[in-house]
Image: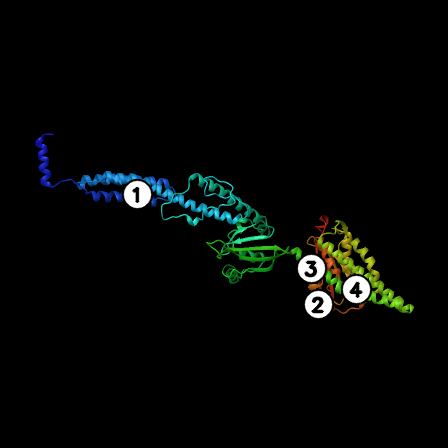
């Protein structure tokens, strides 16, 4: 370039005042500090998902901003930017900030490892594996314990443990705690009692296999449901107990009181359970005494109730039913052995002893039959039975008793050769009890009608008498064991109170049932319903 041109440019610059100005050292230091601060702040914000990519993007963007900013300041502001100190600050601050974040994360990880170890100590109370603070490797140590997690500072520089120690520690603790959690989960799921665990709001978060079986719902449908609504539904309660549920929830979560009561689950095949509910209370230093959720268990006491009922039946049999004939037998036998009795009186007493002994034996046999049938210990031998032939044999035995009481038996078989699959002995026992009751509880000069017919695939055996009848209040109880409806009757018609209970049990074991209708002073009608054999299913009632 010629010297004249250079001089002309200098004169032009002087006249126009276009001079480049360098920044002061203090300003350069300030810009360098701002660059370092920007690196620290932006790397702190670049967290979460895709953190590495965010950090690279932030650093690249900040570097581009420094370079392009320096260019525009130099080109249009006529200022010589402090590019070298700013870049030096950027280059130094970026790895230091990343190192600081790595150290902070490492310290935080040490704290979490210490917390996991503290939890491991609480769960495993016997000799267990521990981490030694004096070693970078795992080893069995039943003496020295790891430092408390509160000894890890977070507000100052702290040299954390090495990555190998962390890797070993996390592997050790995760295996122990996962195995423990799997064991506890398997144990809870294997509990025979129904187990439901809910959160503080009563929403089910865990249900074991027994719960799924009793409630007949898969786990995915049980989880998330309200525990009180589920229990009310299982009890067949009407969902009108919102206030009651809220009160119970408050009693559990706020007052931390336990609840225990009996419930019945199911309609037809109902079972009895003891429901126990309690609060899940925190035990460590962070949530000691705080209610974390609620737990409910259902213990099946159906068998216990049946055993208790059997026990009560036996007590009733001994205290009420067996005492009367035993007292009569004892009293008359003492009279016969200690006193001289006239032959006629002696004969009557011996007849009475014989009658009471037979009654006693009949009562015991009937009770044992009922008990065996209820327990399923009595074998039922099913075979094709012609009902009309069976009824004829029963009436052949009972007609002398009816004739003695001047009672007429009329049979009206609307079907012929009707076949049912049944145990002949048990079916005969059931029908004998029903017809025998009709004879015993009918006044003289009346009649008993026995009818058979088919209806809806069922055979109906109808026994109707013209006896004293049963009141509407007493009718629902006549199939209970030892129950005898109070009515006008002589001492000859006293019974054991077991005949109809045995008849009902036999009918139910054959897939049928017994119904009864009665009106005082007009008579009673007992109908036995039994499934017809397949070859008789199409039989229709004759016109």
**Quick check: marks 2 and 4 in contact, CB under 8 Å?**
no
Q: Which dot marks residue 309? A: 3
Judging depth in this view, the residue of 358 and 294 nearest the camera is 294
Question: Does residue 496 appear left or right of residue 194 in this picture?
Answer: right
State the separation of the CA atoms marked 4 and 3: 29 Å
* Residue 394 in sight from this viewpoint: yes
Q: In this rendering, which labeled residue sits more in front, label 2 or label 1?
A: 1
> Which label's residue is closer to the chain start, 3 or 1?
1
SS at mark 3?
Answer: helix
State the separation of the CA atoms marked 3 and 2: 26 Å
SS at mark 1?
Answer: helix
* Depicted 381 relative to depicted 396: above or below: above
State the separation of the CA atoms marked 3 and 1: 82 Å
State the separation of the CA atoms marked 2 and 4: 18 Å
> Which label's residue is closer to the chain start, 1 or 4?
1
Determine which quarter of the picture holds residue 489: bottom right
> Which label's residue is closer to the chain start, 3 or 2?
3
Q: Which residue was labeled with disc 2?
A: 471
Determine which quarter of the picture holds residue 262: bottom right
SS at mark 4?
Answer: helix
Q: Which residue was labeled with disc 4?
A: 440
Packing grade of label 2 (10 A; few <14, some 14-19, many >=20) is some
Q: Which residue was labeled with disc 1?
A: 39
Judging depth in this view, the residue of 196 and 175 nearest the camera is 175
Packing grade of label 3 (10 A; few <14, some 14-19, many >=20) is few
Picture quarter with the N terminus:
top left
- Which residue, as the protein is rendered here, is positioned at the far right? 343
Q: In this rendering, which labeled residue sits more in front, label 4 or label 3?
A: 3
- Which residue, as the protein is rendered here, is positioned at the far top? 2
């Amino acid at each position: 370039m010629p010297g004249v041109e250079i001089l002309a440019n200098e004169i032009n610059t002087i006249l126009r005042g276009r001079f480049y100005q360098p920044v002061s050292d203090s300003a350069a230091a300030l810009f360098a500090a701002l660059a370092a601060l920007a690196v620290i702040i932006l790397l702190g914000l670049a967290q979460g998902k895709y953190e590495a990519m965010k950090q690279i993007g932030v650093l690249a963007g900040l570097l581009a901003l420094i370079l392009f900013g320096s260019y525009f300041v130099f080109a249009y502001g006529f200022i010589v930017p402090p590019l070298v100190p700013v870049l030096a600050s950027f280059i130094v601050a970026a790895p230091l900030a990343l190192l600081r974040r790595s150290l902070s994360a490492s310290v935080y990880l040490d704290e979490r490892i210490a917390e996991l170890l503290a939890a491991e100590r609480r769960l495993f109370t016997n000799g267990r594996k521990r981490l030694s603070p004096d070693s970078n490797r795992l080893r069995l140590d039943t003496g020295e314990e790891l430092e408390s997690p509160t000894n890890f500072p977070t507000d100052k520089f702290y040299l954390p443990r090495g990555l190998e120690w962390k890797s070993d520690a996390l592997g050790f603790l995760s295996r122990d705690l996962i195995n423990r959690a799997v064991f506890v989960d398997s144990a809870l799921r294997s509990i025979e009692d129904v187990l439901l665990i809910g959160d503080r709001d009563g929403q089910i978060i865990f249900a074991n296999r027994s719960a799924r079986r009793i409630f007949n719902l898969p786990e995915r449908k049980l989880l998330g449901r309200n525990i009180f609504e589920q229990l009310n539904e299982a009890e067949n309660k009407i969902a009108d107990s919102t206030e009651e549920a809220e009160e119970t929830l408050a009693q559990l979560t706020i007052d931390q009181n336990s609840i225990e009561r009996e419930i019945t689950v199911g309609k037809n095949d109902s079972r009895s359970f003891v429901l126990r509910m309690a609060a899940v209370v925190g035990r460590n230093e962070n949530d000691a005494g705080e209610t974390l959720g609620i737990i409910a268990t259902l213990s099946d006491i159906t068998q216990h109730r049946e055993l208790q009922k059997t026990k009560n039946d036996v007590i009733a049999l001994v205290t009420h039913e067996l005492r009367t004939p035993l007292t009569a037998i004892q009293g008359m036998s003492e009279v016969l052995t200690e006193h001289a009795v006239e032959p006629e009186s002696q004969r009557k007493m011996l007849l009475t002893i014989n009658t009471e002994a037979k009654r006693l034996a009949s009562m015991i046999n009937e009770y044992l039959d009922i008990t065996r049938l209820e327990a399923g210990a009595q074998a039922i031998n099913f075979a094709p039975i012609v009902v009309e032939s069976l009824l004829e044999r029963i009436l052949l035995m009972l007609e002398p008793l009816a004739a003695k009481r001047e009672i007429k038996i009329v049979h009206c078989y609307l079907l012929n050769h009707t076949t049912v699959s049944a145990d002949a002995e048990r079916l005969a026992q059931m029908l004998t009890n029903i017809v025998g009751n009709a004879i015993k509880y009918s006044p003289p000069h009346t009649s008993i009608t026995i009818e058979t017919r088919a209806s809806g695939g069922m055979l109906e055996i109808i026994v109707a008498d013209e006896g004293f009848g049963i009141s509407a209040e007493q009718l629902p109880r006549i199939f209970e064991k030892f129950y005898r409806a109070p009515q006008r009757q002589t001492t000859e018609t006293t019974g054991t109170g077991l005949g109809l209970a045995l008849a009902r049990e036999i009918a139910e074991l054959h897939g049928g049932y017994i119904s009864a209708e009665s009106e005082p002073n007009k008579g009673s009608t007992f109908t036995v319903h039994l499934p017809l054999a397949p070859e008789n299913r199409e039989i229709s009632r004759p016109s």
